[in-house]
Amino acid sequence: MTEAPGADAQHNLHILTVLVENRFGVLARIAGLFSRRGFNIFSLAVAPTDDVSLSRISIVVDVHNTDVTQIAKQLDKLVNVLEITELQPASSIERELMLARVSGKDAQAVEQLLTQYGGSIVDSNGEELIVSLHAHPDQLDLCETALHKFGILELQRTGRIALGRLSG
């Protein structure tokens, strides 16, 4: 497998999942903590869990200048934080969603490329295509690079979400 662009920088990234009470202002307090402490957030995704009173926040942090343990300790001090887990890449499943608007001049070639990555065309008007792909972030990086030759007009990525692998 080809290494993703910027993969060397990826070695400093750690994934924290934070279970919090689903209340007004919790995300603002967490973001404020990162800002005050100078911690760099690489990616952030937030959504309710199966229990509507709780949300799970997936935070990918750049620990180039910071110890991830220090970040977890600071998060644990916040009142609405219930649980913090650091997920190791080898023992977790990571996914991200990418939507991209690309030129539709060569729709067949775009579709062939997307097939290689497990993506699809979700909208088309003859001139432009909207493509969708959910995969490991490294795969999205590779697909995004390949899509540049078709002309990316607009791009949105969700940020990583992750769960620990099932044991066994």
Image (cartoon, rainbow, N blue to C red):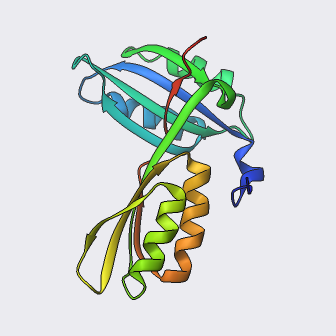
| Percent x, y of residue 132 | 38, 59
The quarter of the displayed image where residue 79 is located: top left
Please give the name of the residue rendered at 45% of the width and 74% of the height, measured from the top-left corner: 110
Please give the name of the residue rendered at 68% of the width and 28% of the height, measured from the top-left corner: 90
Q: Nearer the viewer, residue 154 or 34?
A: 154
Q: How many marks?
A: 0
| Percent x, y of residue 49 | 30, 23
Left or right, residue 63 beside residue 19: right
Q: Nearer the viewer, residue 113 or 21?
A: 113
Please give the name of the residue rendered at 38% of the width and 25% of the height, measured from the top-left corner: 56
121 shown above or below 71: below
The quarter of the displayed image where residue 74 is located: top right
Left or right, residue 123 beside residue 112: left
Left or right, residue 25 beside residue 160: left
The quarter of the displayed image where residue 89 is located: top right
83 shown above or below 156: above
- Considering the image in quadrants, where does the C terminus appear? top right
54 shown above or below 48: above
19 shown above or below 152: above
Q: Nearer the viewer, residue 109 or 137?
A: 109
Task: Tell me if I can see residue 132 in this picture.
Answer: yes
| Percent x, y of residue 28 | 36, 35
Q: Nearer the viewer, residue 14 or 78?
A: 14
Please give the name of the residue rendered at 24% of the width and 23% of the height, measured from the top-left corner: 23
| Percent x, y of residue 142 | 61, 61
Task: Tell me if I can see residue 39 in this picture.
Answer: no
